[in-house]
Image (spheres, rainbow, N blue to C red):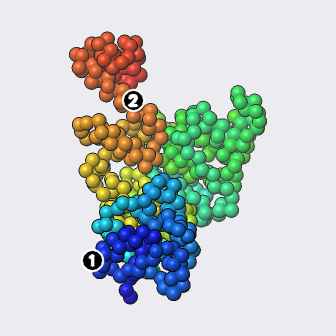
Amino acid sequence: MTQTVWIIDDDKAIRWVLEKSLARSGIAYVSFPSADDALNALYDATPSVIISDIRMPGTDGLKFLAKVKQEHPSLPVIVMTAHSDLDSAVAAFQGGAFEYLPKPFDVDQAVALIERALAESRSGDNADEAAVDMPTLLGQAPAMQDVFRAIGRLSQSSVTVLITGESGSGKERVAEALHRHSVRAGKPFIALNTAAIPKDLLESELFGHEKGAFTGALGTRRGRFEEAEGGTLFLDEIGDMPTELQTRLLRVLSDGHFYRVGGHTPIKANVRVIAATHQNLEEHVKQGKFREDLFHRLNVIRLRLPALRERSEDIPLLTRHFLARSAANLGVEPKRLTDAAMELVRHYPFPGNVRQLENLCQWITVMAPGQTVEVSDLPPEFRNEPGTVSSEPAVASSSATGSVATPPASSGSADWAQLLAREVSQRLAAGETGIIDDLTARFESTCIKSGLAHTGGRKVEAAQLLGWGRNTLTRKIQELGLEHGAE
């Protein structure tokens, strides 16, 4: 079947240029001087692609776009206008435009865009779109099949489970699956990230408090243990729990009851506890950071969740699922990756694991032009362009160690800013928090060390060059633990 492009513009010169360019490329076309003429023609024929002006007498391009999408939602429409303002661009994309082409445009680029839209049109009817209502957990890799089997075996048990795995690998999804397939499925599933709650509030968050227990406690409050009564309490990042709260948690697990903060009446806890961590708890026990008896209480059954790079065969399946879900949330058609684009994504190391892949799919749904996503539509780090992430990017390590990968040296303030932006993006994708504090400390440490090296260790002179007073420099050296390197 011959594919045909419809050109709609009240400017005869624009129509002529596009007609000649399409003819040279062997692409069939039909031209219309107005959107109303094209709408009438749609009753008798349907083109493969439409390229339309926005500002025309009669029905304008945006209204025309809305009518076309109502009747032919998968028909690619390229919108062009000489009035390349933000409002028009946003309105075009909101209306479902394939791409927005501001005038004046390069004819070769316009033809390339049309050819791409034609390819999109060819593949539209045969697309194998992922179902939005896929299971919470997906995976065909052997490591994930082991996790699925373990969830099945634990379905009739309320035993405590410890889930280990890197940040972003989906530990909470596993906990949800354990709850959903357990005898407690009809009761609440309550999740709490212990690392995200300030230490002085975590006790009240877990166990609740009585009125007047502390300043600001204006009334009695139920904690997460009470909210999860009869169900499951998921404690994420358990390795960050303060020692004094570890003691209280151990008592709940061993005695089966707890007290609210400021309370004197024991409350029975009928709750299954599932804990998770990206840290090495055995090492924390050796270092005295985590109670050994609590570790053994939690470590009854351990499930290790593999990193995404360990199950790269699952990436295409997960990508289609996340693209479908993102599209459903936005009320648009799901995007599809070409084989080449999918291959690049599949071989990306994903330091942020499944969470980073999901973020990528959300980015693609919003930012990629058209329904078919080419390699050129992917973010720069996935295309491995100069000045972006390499095939093995330097990635911030977990907050457990407090260390971060150092970006390669480069010259020029622009390169420095790009490297900073890259690291921030990677750490956000990995789900880290407190990024500014850590980067600020590293920045100040580097400035201090370089300043002291430049002045031969003379603090007064270094402080002046850095724009600080001597006392400020001395305090910073102490805060950052640089005393031995700043003699």
- How far across and how far down the image is residue 210, in percent? 75, 35
In the image, what residue type sits under mark 1?
Arg
Q: Which residue is mark 2?
A: 441
**Residue 217 vertical position relative to residue 29 in the rendered view, above or below:** above
Where residue 279 appears, as percent x and y from the top left, is: 43, 45
Q: Is residue 210 above or below residue 451?
A: below
**Residue 459 sits in quarter:** top left
Residue 47 sits above or below residue 65 on the image: below
Q: Secondary structure at mark 1?
A: helix
The circle on residue 24 is 1
141 over 353 or under it: above or below: below
Query: For the residue labelled by badge 2, is the local secondary structure a helix, a strand or a loop?
Result: helix
Q: Earlier in the sequence, mark 2 or mark 1?
A: 1
Q: Nearer the viewer, mark 2 or mark 1?
A: 1
Report the residue at 39% width, 38% height from top: 401
Q: Which quarter of the figure is the N terminus placed in?
A: bottom left
Total marks shown come to: 2
Residue at 30% over, 39% down? 414
Residue at 30% over, 49% down: 388
Residue kind at label 2, given as amino acid type: Ala
Query: Image quadrant for the C terminus?
Result: top left
Residue 292 percent coordinates (x, y): 49, 40
Residue 248 image offset from top left, x and y in percent: 61, 38
The reply to whether dot 2 and dot 1 touch (C-beta < 8 Å) is no
Q: Is residue 102 visible?
A: yes
